[in-house]
Amino acid sequence: QVRLVESGGGLVQAGGSLRLSCAASGSFFSIDDMGWYRQAPGKQRELVATITSGGSTNYADSVKGRFTISRDNAKNTVYLQMNSLKPEETAVYYCNVEIRPRPWSRRDYWGQGTQVTVSS
């Protein structure tokens, strides 16, 4: 059974920084893409950033230059460093991990979500 545990959310003033972490544990063959999404109240969940197993990254235009996604494959962990945060980025942030339980199968897993609140 796979488990994702997120941490690092909290309250920060506008312009501040936070670092989110998401660790995968359990029994599986490998991890493919890892990513972060966010959902603000009354809005749809949106992509923030993704990173492939090889380290290629993709960012939403709104966060380019301010957020950095990274991963530690030895720890099965993905990180999101968020700088220059804006009040409109207040949301629940979810990690998403593509896991291969076996070499021939792949399944998406979601973290429980961590609240990020940016005060003005």
Image: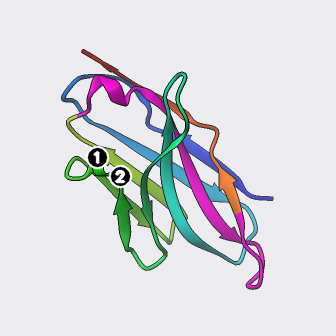
At x 70% / y 78%, what residue is drawn?
29
What secondary structure is marked by label 1?
A: helix
Say whether marks 2 and 1 touch (CB < 8 Å): yes
User: Which mark, residue 60?
Assistant: 2
Q: Quadrant of residue 82?
A: top left
Q: CA distance from mark 2 to mark 1?
A: 6 Å
67 left or right of 41 in image: left
Q: Is 88 contained in the magenta span?
A: yes
- Residue 9's x, y, as percent? 44, 32
- Residue wearing tag 1: 63
Front position in the image: 75 or 84: 84
View extreme (top): residue? 120
At x 38% / y 50%, what residue is drawn?
80
Q: Give the amino acid type for the residue marked by disc 1 in the picture.
A: Val
Front position in the image: 76 or 56: 56
Which residues fall within the magenta stretch?
Answer: 85-107
- Residue 109's x, y, as percent? 68, 55
Give the position of the N terminus as an image quadrant: bottom right
Q: Is 8 contained in the magenta span?
A: no
Would you call the spot at circle 1 few (<14 residues within 10 Å), some (14-19), or many (20 or more)?
A: some
- The image shows residue 65, relative to residue 98, as above or below, that is above
What secondary structure is marked by label 2?
A: loop
- The image shows residue 51, relative to residue 14, as above or below, that is below
117 left or right of 29 in image: left
- Residue 35's x, y, as percent? 49, 57
- The image shows residue 111, relative to residue 68, as above or below, that is above
- Residue 11's x, y, as percent? 37, 21
